[in-house]
Image (cartoon, rainbow, N blue to C red):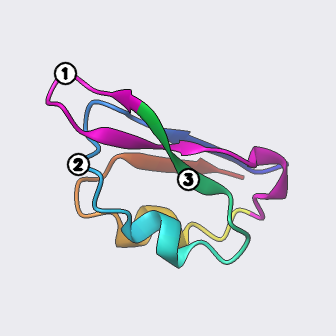
Amino acid sequence: MPKIEIESEYCKSCLFCVEACPKKVIGTTSAVNSKGYQYAVAINPDACVGCAICATVCPDAAIEVYK
């Protein structure tokens, strides 16, 4: 089963990953990281198919996908 990990401290809330995910696995949280950004989180991790589009579009390399 694929697994997604998002490093909240690297996330700048660009939301490219949210838009790119074909299965709507990623969303945002109301919490903020140490830089003051609301960061992306896996809101529906069981739907992840391991396509890694999210990791590819992330400009901050904040996402790892494990298959």
Q: What's the amino acid at mark 1?
A: Ser
The reply, left or right, for residue 28 in relation to residue 49 is: left
- Residue 25, percent from left and from top: 68, 58
Q: CA distance from mark 2 to mark 1?
A: 11 Å
Q: Quadrant of residue 24?
A: bottom right
Q: What's the amino acid at mark 2?
A: Lys
Magenta region, residue range = 31-49
Residue depicted at 67% across the width and 45% down the height? 43
Residue depicted at 27% across the width and 30% down the height? 9
Q: Indicate yes or no whether the magenta region holds residue 34.
A: yes
Categorize mark 2 by other alpha carbons within 10 Å: few (<14), some (14-19), many (20+).
some
Q: CA distance from mark 2 to mark 3?
A: 13 Å
Categorize mark 1 by other alpha carbons within 10 Å: few (<14), some (14-19), many (20+).
few
Instruction: Name the foreground residue: 36 vs 65.
Output: 36
The reply, left or right, for residue 37 in relation to residue 27 is: left
Mark 2–mark 1 CB contact (< 8 Å): no
Mark 1–mark 3 CB contact (< 8 Å): no
Q: Label 3: which residue? A: 27
- Residue 20, percent from left and from top: 51, 77
Q: What's the amino acid at mark 3?
A: Gly
Q: Label 1: which residue? A: 34
Q: Label 2: which residue? A: 12
User: Which element type, helix, strand or loop, lies under badge 2?
Assistant: loop
Categorize mark 3 by other alpha carbons within 10 Å: few (<14), some (14-19), many (20+).
some
Work out which residue is located at the far left of the displayed protein and give it.
Answer: 35
User: Which element type, helix, strand or loop, lies under badge 1?
Assistant: loop
Q: Image height check: is 31 above or below 38?
A: above
